[in-house]
Image (cartoon, rainbow, N blue to C red):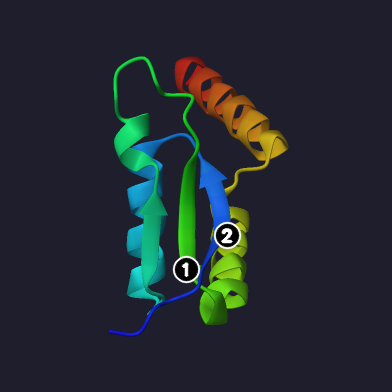
Amino acid sequence: MDAIDLVTIYTLYDPIKAEIIKNYLEDEGVRTFINGSNQAAEPGLMAMEIEIQVGAADAERASSLIANHKTESQFDESDIEMDEADAGDEQSAATDG
């Protein structure tokens, strides 16, 4: 078996999110490893850093996939406020009629 030079492309503290990221990258064809999730899962150690690691050859692509996914799944706070305001308008329209 060939040795793989691993590169840390992302760090976080949530072991569940780490698994989600790993599954996403592997679905995209990037072999992914998680370093530190066992320690972070111990009670009282939630502040332990978890590293998402990939082979050096895949690092740029994996980082790009994560960045694109984060951008697509972020909500703009002004959109959320607008949705709440629209819901209030719909509710008052329903009670007026």
Q: Which residue is drawn at 40% across and 21% down?
A: 45
Mark sitting on residue 9: 2
Q: Dot 1: few (<14), some (14–19), or many (≥20) neighbours within 10 Å?
A: many
Front-most of residues 97 and 52:
52
Is residue 46 placed above or below 28 in the rendered structure? above
Q: Which amino acid does label 1 sit on?
A: Val
Circle 2 packing at 10 Å, graded few (<14), some (14-19), many (20+), is some
Rendered image: mark on residue 18: none
| Quadrant in the picture for residue 39 | top left
- The amino acid at mark 2 is Ile
Residue corresponding to mark 1: 54
Q: Quadrant of the N terminus?
A: bottom left
Q: Give the percent coordinates (x, y) of residue 89.
A: 59, 25
Residue under the image location 63 percent in, 56 percent down: 71
Q: In this view, does 94 lie to the left or right of 80?
A: left
Residues under labels 2 and 1: Cα distance? 7 Å
Residue 81 percent location from the top left of the image: 66, 29
- Residue under the point 50% across and 73% down: 5
